[in-house]
Amino acid sequence: MLRQYELVERVRRYDPDADEELLDRAYVFSMKAHGNQKRASGDPYFSHPIEVAGILTDLHLDDQTIATAILHDTIEDTVATYDEIERLFGTQVARMVDGVTKLSKIEAQSESQRAAENLRKFLLAMSDDIRVLLVKLADRLHNMRTLRHIPNPDKRRRIARETMEIYAPLAERIGMYEFMKEMQTLAFRELEPEAYESITKRLEQMREGDSGDRVARIASGLTLLLGRHGIQAEVTGREKHPYSIWRKMTERHISFEQLSDVMAFRAVVADTEQCYRALGLIHQRWPMVPGRFKDYVSTPKRNGYRSLHTTVIHNEKARVEIQIRSEAMHAQAEFGYAAHWAYKSGTPADTGGRKVSWIRDLVEILDTAESAEELLEHTRMAMYQDRIFAFTPSGELIQLPKGATPIDFAYAVHTDLGNQAVGAKVNGRLVPLRTPIANGDQVQILKSAAQSPQPEWLNFVVTAKARASLRRYVRNKERDETIALGRKFYEEIVARLPAPVRPEALGEALKRLHLPSEEALMEAIARRSIDDAAVADALMPGVAAASAPPPRALPHRDAVSIKGLTPGVAFRLAACCHPVPGDRIVGLRRPDAPVEVHAIDCATLAAQGDADWVDLAWGDASDGGTARLSVILRNEPGALGVMAGILGAHAANILNLSLTHRDASFHTFHVDLEVRDLAHLMRILAALRAADAVSSAERVRRGEEEEARWEAA
């Protein structure tokens, strides 16, 4: 463990102006606060925050960050309070200690509201001051180095899994690759001990077979090659770490022997110009492996990482990965955003001129996540996905995950642009909104103020920001419609009362019903979570019970008659299979929900294990239902008119028409129709299939996977 004077001296070596008195006070305060506490290893607990501070001195961080590291466990594990830390060490240090404490409380395996709230507070703190994350990552790294001392294997695995799922990706996102690699290796050793042991042993055997000097020979050859052409380079080589090797083996489904690029080399040169010169010399000397060149200099990673990556076939018949970067790029790659805090060169609002945009995106979706599961899902999406680069028409670079669509692009530019998107041009050509964007595409979003987000976009967007914005819109729209519906029923309840309602009666009723607002009452009425009689009695106590309206079905139930249900029981026709009179049907009943009416051959029924089944049949007074058709029209003038004419001739009302796919020869439409019964539907299908303009016409029922996405929307 570092002694007090040793820690202070470490800081003063790279920052002679450091506040020595602040560090001394923090050291003494933390030592006294932790007192006789012990770690699982038996060491004094106080040794842990000092080692964390020591890790951060290797990154040359400022004195406030070092003081935060020394104090980071005091609020959580001792009687010290936030106010006390603020009074003794200042507001900035107190806020950072509090931010670290918030993240320390997250349980990766606990999908609870508390976990989400802690993550919410941490992200907000981190977006203001990235040093909070630097301290937490150093804290987790030291905990992983001492993980073996924890006797409970389940706890060790939980901590290792937490590290692999949250902390290592966080380290990667801010460019701290050395932290990421060590955390992944230590977590991998705990989670997959046999795989770790096997790969480590194979690496040792490989070194022994090469007399242990192949890495040195290749590095020396690279140095000589560049030196002969006037480029002074510091070349280092290493074997890839065990977790990286294991991940490639599992992803590619290959053995260790088949994995040829287990060595990586780094050439650090003076400036950007020499990076490209060195790349050209290397490609002239050895053949490049196709598809393995990446230019992160002209298009940096989202965390600011810049480097040239290439893989070549070396003359020892080995595939060798080489990274080429300038000295400035190397500092960024080694320490990430931590490099901006060296020698007090940054402030919380200025991380070297680069905004931590992915953190900003996470903060923006904090207000849109309805549940803890959704928030944690968005967080992991933002941390894990690989990136592509696309450009706005003005040349602004937008980074997105692989598989992103124009809708993801629009939301990445601005939420309002995503909400108003009606079309897109990629490289000047109109494309469907679900088209995946490729690296280097220029994307122009066409918008209209009259447009609103479409729930079906949730079926293909991939970014957390887009999904969160769409889910918020769908929830808000559904709530507004529910409140409007509840207001109509409220007016019916009031109309049935024996006397006019006083103006102040509504406010008094809300208190009696323990509801916070008028909107909450209307929503409760529409959802039938409150009885009509209870509403009437709350408005006019003692008088209304005898005149309360009879029980009613949910207002949005379909205008059909169903045999097998008690009159007044709410039901709805399932959107997954669109049953119409004539289909064999079955009901699914769940608590506090209307009965779902499904066609007996619905693809989603097998997954409905939590519902009671009810035998149903169509009643004599059924007025029809809604059917969905998929119609493929030939791409020729008048084809759409032919389809519309057939539907009109058969008295089928079109409720919704959407173009789902188009190419040079055919256009595919989804059509929602009001039909009287199954026989009516079959006549319409037969007429469509007989038309020359129609290539095919089929009834559509969504599959289980699409239904789940629809319900999630």
Image: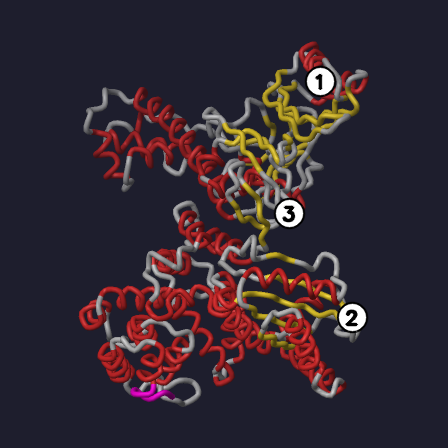
Decide if residue 634 is on the left or right side of residue 401: right
Q: Quarter of the image holding residue 711?
A: top right
Q: Position of residue 199 (x, y in %)?
A: 69, 78
Disc 3: CA contacts within 10 A as few (<14), some (14-19) or many (>=20):
few
User: Residue 270, percent across and down?
Assistant: 53, 67
Inspect the magenta stretch and tell me whether residue 516 lies in it.
no
C-alpha distance separating marks 1 and 3: 30 Å
Residue under the point 47% across and 59% down:
111
Q: Closer to the camera, 123 or 375?
A: 123
Corner quadrant of residue 527? top left
Q: Is residue 371 visible?
A: yes
When the figure is inspected, residue 323 is found, relative to residue 604, above or below; the finding is below
- Work out how far the residue at label 1 is from the one at label 2, CA to CA, in angstroms: 61 Å
Q: Is residue 137 above or below residue 471?
A: below
Question: Which secondary structure, mark 1?
Answer: helix
Say which amino acid is labelled 2: Gln
- Disc 1 residue type (three-letter): His
Q: Residues within 10 Å of mark 1 (few under 14, many from 20)?
A: some
Residue denoted by label 1: 680
**Residue at 38% in and 59% down:** 351
Name the residue carrying label 2: 258
Residue 2 forms part of the magenta stretch: yes
Secondary element at image label 2: loop
Of 187 and 105, which appears nearest the observer? 187
Kindly report the distance in space between the C-alpha atoms of the residues bearing marks 2 and 3: 41 Å
Kind of residue sitting beneath label 3: Ala
Label annotation for residue 607 = 3
**Residue in view at x 55 percent, y 48 percent:** 400
Discs 2/3, front: 2
**Which quadrant of the rendered structure holds the N terminus?**
bottom left
The magenta-colored residue range is 1-6
Are the residues flagged by discs 1 and 2 in contact, CB closer than 8 Å?
Answer: no
